[in-house]
Image (tube, rainbow, N blue to C red):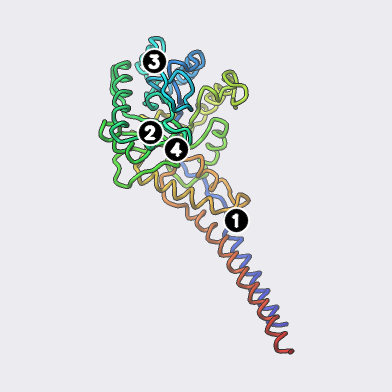
Amino acid sequence: MRTLIFYRRVLSTLIFVCIASITASATQPIDNKRVNIVFRYDDYSATSPTDMELRIIDSFGKHEASITFGVIPFRCVRDAHDPSPQDIVPLTSIKANILKNGFKDGILDIALHGYSHQTISAKQMTQFSGLAYNAQVERLAKGKNFLEGIINAPFTTFVPPWNKYDLNTLRALEELGFSTLSAGMDGVATENSNLIFLPATCHLSRLRDAVKAARTSSDTQPVIVVLFHAYDFKEIDEKRGSITYQEFSDLLNWLKSQDDVCLLSISQAAKVINNLSASRFLLNKRNRALSRLLPSSLRDEESITIYQEYRGYPVSPKIFLKVGGFYLLIVISVTVLFLIMGIFCFRDLCVL
């Protein structure tokens, strides 16, 4: 009986220590920290809703802020999800002038968003991943030259359709003089890549929460890249939309009223944010993989913000402690359970 009481005390002590480490206090905000927010609007094309896009441009212009437009130079005329041959339509003169004027005024930052935004596969939505290297170079070069002819200036940001790309894409981008890739956090990268990686991290509906979480994170330069489309507005698509234009305008007003928030385009962020290299991208992938090991009930703001923020430092010590403590608790509990069972079994054998 004394042995059993001893093991119970040991188990209780170990559980207390593990729970204390798991529920450690949240990281305190860092003084003078600025939360950098990048807005990325995808799918600007000959067929995209011009009126809404003009309202978006007007909103950023009023706040003297810049937004990145992912532009499709030659939109396929039917379904982008259909890989069968389709005609393409280039930007109209109206849409071209909007780009040119917005770029000239410093409101629009231009990014190439694929070629025609038509998938090459019915099984996986992608226009570049899986495509031969030479074919990728050809499409990227045509799209880049076309858009640079419109704005009469070079640009160096690429946004792949469906955020899908492969290692051949990275090679092709560097060959053609692109410097920045903005896709998603599930993409690939090599440590020796010279590209700047600035992936999308957040949707409009989660932006306020992302800002709140970023304020308490350990990062001194937190970056949130907000990806949205025309269909995110209820005025454009009532079923898919998550926000009205008025709510979007109110959101921008709120962001501009925050002293610690800075609105940037992708090109601006690439110049002022420290270390947007492939190493940072790969570190963020590891952070996310580690965070997934925690059950949702144990994820606090420090854990959740990993999915909404592009961090500039390695695996969070706090999250590492939580993951380690959680699984250590499981191992200890199972071990002690077997010890207790062994004691009872041994006692029964002694009685026999």
Q: Which residue is mark 2?
A: 128
Report the mark closest to the observer, 3 or 1: 3
Q: CA distance from mark 1 to mark 4?
A: 31 Å
Among the two numbered marks 4 and 3 on one chain, the one whose residue lies closer to the N terminus: 3
The picture quadrant where one finds residue 9 is bottom right
Helix, strand or loop status at disc 4:
loop
Q: CA distance from mark 4 to mark 3?
A: 26 Å
Task: Give x and y (percent) for residue 85.
Answer: 41, 23
Report the mark closest to the observer, 1 or 2: 2
Among the two numbered marks 4 and 2 on one chain, the one whose residue lies closer to the N terminus: 2
Give the class, few, some or many, for how many residues have Cα within 10 Å of label 2's Cα (few <14, many ≥20). many
The picture quadrant where one finds residue 277 is top left
Report the mark closest to the observer, 4 or 3: 3
Determine whether, in the image, residue 1 is placed left or right of residue 212: right
Among the two numbered marks 1 and 2 on one chain, the one whose residue lies closer to the N terminus: 1
Q: Which residue is mark 3?
A: 91
Q: In the image shown, does 315 or 42 lie closer to the viewer? A: 42
Q: Which residue is mark 4?
A: 184
Q: CA distance from mark 3 to mark 2?
A: 21 Å
What's the residue at 51%, 16% (across, down)? 52
